[in-house]
Amino acid sequence: MSYNSFWALQAESCHDVLAELHRELAAHFDSPKAFFLDGPSAPPPPPYEVRNGVAVIRISGVIDRVARISFFTGLPYTEGQNRIRQSVETALADPKVRGILFCINSPGGSAAGTKELADFIADGAEQKPMAAYADGLCASAAYWLASATGRIFAPVTAQVGSIGVIAVLTDWTKATEKAGLVRTVLASGQWKAAGSPDKTLTDDERALFQEQLETLHGIFRQDVSARMGINAPFEQWAEGQTVLGTRAMELGLVSGLARDLAEAESIFAESISKEDFMDLRELKAQHPDLVEELAGEIKKQCEEDGQKAVAGARAEIMALVKAVAGDETAAKIEAVANAGISASQLQALAPVLGGKPAEAKNTEEEARANILENIMKATGGPLPAGAQARTGKNPLIADAERRAAQRMVI
């Protein structure tokens, strides 16, 4: 648990974690078979308790990625992030639950996974209202999770905050030297053995770990500031210090003071009752006028969005026309468009404007084709190429007059 790891944890609590591990390991060496006893284990704790529509999820002790269970008692001696996530998921899906309240008494825990769990809680708070109660101690990683709800209650004597990151690296080279042992560390890669207890930390390795600590601290501080709306200088609340409930209230680390968990539940349940959450079906049944008003606003917004989209498309088209046909043609087209003239109206106005619509041109071409067809029928063939138009009498009339004159002579 502790080797080469970052913790968002109160420094004094590190000793408690190591002491618990020592007790577990000592018991193993005293009675190795105890690890394999087939006796009944303690039943897992319920995910939450529901009172007045509020699901109370308890978080107690050091927070780790997964709960670490004692081989001897069957009970967890660390709180697991996985159990917290599962409890929240269950409560969000539970129709009896209208809000979630975390009851926290924890010094913090592993930095790994805490931000991701805090983000998950913050997303869940958008589905159902959430809050946290600092039940004595809510520090480091525990406060990171509590702040994700955006609402924290605490008694005046509670300790909250401890916003920082810590890493404890052990160097036992002198101890092994006194014991007459030589432990050689072989590694490929400059940083592979960084933090190993079998070698002294170099300046570069120390700088690497410190940079990672500062990065995690900055993320921690930014999340808390954004979700709790803290405006005080971060030196007053985010340098790893814990503060009591009253001072925490002044700094913005706490949203309200509550004497105990019962009072925190009552305040939270009352705030939920004022927030009337319902689905669309319930909204239609209970407030049809409001649904109609909302529908009208949505329709209006859609129309405005549609007009903006059309205007954008039109601007792109005019830019293309301007690039291809020039400024003058583009200006004429835009003037016609701004006048609101439709295509049919423009065709009707074509004779007045001096232009010929495409349909008129087609009609004219059809008329010419009909005339040529009639001429071919009358003359028996097409006109000779390059033929000149004749003037004077019609050739048929002249031929008839000539024949009549010949008869008179005979």
Image (cartoon, rainbow, N blue to C red):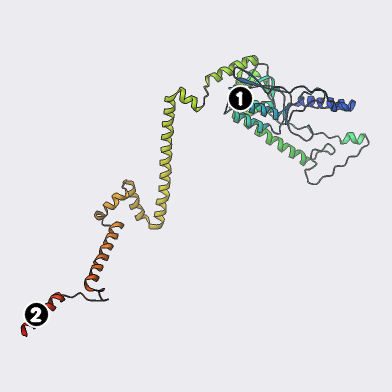
Q: Quadrant of the N terminus?
A: top right
The kind of residue on which mark 2 rests is: Ala
The reply to whether residue 230 is visible in this rendering is no
The kind of residue on which mark 1 rests is: Asp
Q: Give how far across and how far down residue 267 sits, in percent.
A: 59, 16
Q: Nearer the viewer, residue 116 or 139?
A: 116
Q: Pointer 2: what residue?
A: 404
Label 2 sits on a secondary structure element that is helix
- In the image, residue 316 above or below residue 65: below
Mark 1 and mark 2 lie on one chain; the one further toward the N terminus is 1
Q: Give how far across and how far down residue 184 sits, in percent.
A: 87, 42
Quick check: marks 1 and 2 in contact, CB under 8 Å? no
Q: Nearer the viewer, residue 352 or 235?
A: 352
Q: Which mark is residue 94?
A: 1
Q: Is residue 255 left or right of residue 69?
A: left
Label 1 sits on a secondary structure element that is loop
Q: Nearer the viewer, residue 337 or 247?
A: 337
Q: Give how far across and how far down residue 408 sits, in percent.
A: 5, 82
Q: Dividing the picture into quarters, in which one does residue 28 lie?
A: top right
Direction bottom: furthest residue = 410
Q: Residue at x 77, y 22 (%)?
A: 42
Q: Is residue 366 left or right of residue 56?
A: left
